[in-house]
Amino acid sequence: MIDVARVADVSLKTVSRVVNGEPSVRPETERRVRLAITELGFRRNDAARSLRQRHRTRTLGLVISDVGNPFYSAIARGVEQVVRTRDMLLVTGSSDEDPERERNLIRELLERRVDGLIVSPAPADHRYLLADMAHGVPIVFIDRPPGRIEADTILLDNAGGARAAVEHLLELGHERIGFIGDLPTIFTAAERLRGYRAALDAHRVRKDREIVHLGSHNAESAGRALRELLALPAPPTALLTGNNRITIGVLTELARSHAALALIGFDDLELADLLGRPLTAVAYDAEELGRRAAALVVRRLDGHHGPAEQLIEPTSLVVRASSGSRLRA
Amino acid sequence: MIDVARVADVSLKTVSRVVNGEPSVRPETERRVRLAITELGFRRNDAARSLRQRHRTRTLGLVISDVGNPFYSAIARGVEQVVRTRDMLLVTGSSDEDPERERNLIRELLERRVDGLIVSPAPADHRYLLADMAHGVPIVFIDRPPGRIEADTILLDNAGGARAAVEHLLELGHERIGFIGDLPTIFTAAERLRGYRAALDAHRVRKDREIVHLGSHNAESAGRALRELLALPAPPTALLTGNNRITIGVLTELARSHAALALIGFDDLELADLLGRPLTAVAYDAEELGRRAAALVVRRLDGHHGPAEQLIEPTSLVVRASSGSRLRA
DNA sequence: TTGAAAGCGCTAACAT
DNA sequence: ATGTTAGCGCTTTCAA
C-alpha cells in the first residue's frame, strides 16, 4: 500500500481511503491511486486489516467428518447459503471422525480467528472449548451433541424417524422387524436404535436381539450382516437399516440373493426412485440442517446472548415400493 | 500474549517461545506460562503471525460452482487430502457458475492471502489474474480451462470419454445414436459433443442433427428432450447423455415410458449397479482430479517455476446393462 | 481534502 | 535462559 502511495504520489492514508471507498477523495486523486493500484497489481491484505479493525475475519469455520460425504456436503451447502448473505467465507476441514484431528482442526480455525464455528463432533470431552466460548466465539454443534458442555446444537430427529419407520412396518402387519445399524457409540446410531426399540415397545411387539445387528460401518459388513439375518431359523420379514451406507450394502446383497424382505432405509438416496425396487426411506433436509446451524451462529454474531439451545430437525417417511404392501393376515 | 506475559511474569518473547515450542525455556518458566495461557484462554492470533512471518497463511482457496454437487465435493475431498499433508486449511466458495460472483470470491480469497488457488471457472476473461500470478500466487484451473490466459489446468478427457461411449454403441451395431447434452457454451458440454461427433465421423456414420439435443440444464428438460427424440419418425436406438443430471432425467422418463433404448451416461452414478437397469457410464476419478490440481499448486509453492501445464485426467467406460447387447444384424 | 503518527498481536534479529 | 526493539500492512485518531 505504501508502494501504491509512492507511485500515486499521495499519502498512505489516501490510498486506504480509495481502497475502502471512503469519501473525501478528489476524483483526480482517486484516479491516480487506482492507476497505481492496477500498475502494481495491489491487493489489500486482509490479515493486516482484521488486525486493526474490530477483529472480524468474516470467516466461518466448519468441521465435519468428510467433505466428500453427500450428507456433509449438503450441510456445507446450507451453511454456505447463509454465510454468503453476510459476505463471509467458509473454511472447511474434515476430521475423519478422529477426535484428535477434530481438536487440531478446531484449534487451527480458532487461531485463524474465525468469527464462528460449526462442528459435527466425534465423541469426546469438549470442555476445552469453554474458554473460547467465554471469549465470545459462537460455537454450534451439528448432527451430534458435544461432550460435557452446553452449547447450541442442532440434531436430526433420529429416534422419531426410526420409530416412524418401524411403526409403518408394524401397520403393514410385520412382527419380525430386524435392524442393522452402526456402533451405538455413535450418537445417531444409538438414537436410531432407541427409536426402533421404542416403536416395538409401544406396540407391545417382542424385541428379539437375534435380528438386531450393530457395528456395521460400511456397505460390505452390512451385506454380511444381512446374510446372517436371512440365514436365521426365523429370519425377519422386514428390516430397518441405520444409514445410507448400510442401506446400500443391504440393497446390493438383496439384488444378489433375491430374498423377499420389506425394507426401509434411514437416509434417503438420491436415486431412490429409480432403483430396481424404489426405496422407502427416512428422509430429511440436510441443507436445512446446515442453514439452521449457521443461523444459530449468525444470531450470536449479531449480539444474541441467550442460553444454549437445542434444535431438532424433523424427518419424514417417504414411502415407496421397498416397504411392500400389507401382509396377508 | 502480552497479558499472558504479565500473568506469568515473563517477557512477551518468552511466551512466544513457549507457544511456538522454541527451545531455551526453563521447564519451570514454561509451566508458569502454560498456566497463564490456560487461565486466560489464550489463542495465538494467526493473522498477526502470518503478517510478521514470511506471509504464509497455510491456506488454500477453492472456487467451485457448488459445494453440494457430488462432483465438486469429490474434488474438494481430493484437494483436502493433499492440503492436509501440508498442514494447510481449505477455504471454499461456490460461484454458482456466475462469473461475477466467481471474480468476487477470488478477490476475497486473494485478499485473505491464500497461498494458492484452485478454480473451476465459468466462461470469462481471466486476465485480471495475471497480476496476482506474477506476484507468485499459484492459480490452477480445474475441470475447465481459464479464459485468455495461460495457467496450470487439469481437465477430464471429455471428448475421449464421449467418443469411447459412442464407439461402444457402434460396435454393438447401433447406427442411430442420439445425444442429449447441456449448452455448448459450457466447456465440458462442448467437448463431449465433439467426442460424440468424432466417433460418428471416424466410423463414417451419418450425423443426424435431429437426434442431437443441446441445452438441457436439468433433469426435467432432459426428460422432455427424450420424449421429443422418441416421438421422432425415426427415433434413435441408442443414446449418450452428456452429464449426470441429464442421465437422471432420461432414466426417470424411461422408467415412465418403458421405451427400449440403449443408454450410456457421461458421469457415473453412485448407485448405477442397483438401478432397475444398471447404467453403463463414462466414469472417472473426481477425487484424483482434485488431488492432481492440488499437487500442481503445491509444486509451485515448493518453488517450481516451469511454464503452465495442461493435464488430462482419463475416463473409462464402465459397461453395465443399459448399453444393451449386440443388435440383431 | 489530505496527511502524520500510533498501534493491532505477533515474530525476527539482536541484546543481555 | 530471557528480554528489548523494530516492524509486518493496515486502520484509527487526530491534526493540518
Image: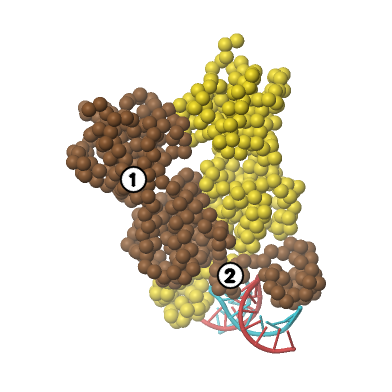
Chain colours: A brown, B yellow, C cyan, D red
Q: Where is residue B293 in the image (x, y as percent from the top left)?
A: 61, 46
SS at mark 2 in the image: helix
The image quadrant where one finds the C terminus of chain B is top right
Q: Where is residue A197 in the image (x, y as percent from the top left)?
A: 24, 44
Reading the image, the residue beneath label 1 is A161
SS at mark 1 in the image: helix
Is the residue marked by circle 1 packed among few (<14), some (14-19), or many (20+) residues within 10 Å?
many
Q: Can residue B221 be seen in this view?
A: yes
Q: Distance between the residues labelled 2 and 1?
A: 44 Å
Residue visible at 21% across and 44% down? A202
* Image quadrant assignment for residue C13: bottom right
Reading the image, the residue beneath label 2 is A50
Q: Which is nearer the eye, B220 or B101? A: B220
Precedes in sequence: disc 2 or disc 1: 2
Q: Which is nearer the eye, B233 or A153? A: B233
Q: Position of residue A186 (x, y in %)?
A: 34, 49
Q: Would you place residue A72 above or below residue A7 in this image?
A: above
Q: Can residue B77 be seen in this view?
A: no
* Image quadrant assignment for residue A238: top left
Residue visible at 42% across and 68% down? A133
- Decide if residue B150 is on the left or right side of residue A147: right
Q: Which is nearer the eye, B293 or B143? A: B143
Is the residue marked by circle 2 packed among few (<14), some (14-19), or many (20+) residues within 10 Å?
some
Residue type marked 1: Gly
Residue type marked 2: Ser
Residue visible at 40% across and 29% down? A277
Q: Do marks 2 and 1 both belong to one polypeptide chain?
A: yes
Nearer the camera: disc 2 or disc 1:
1
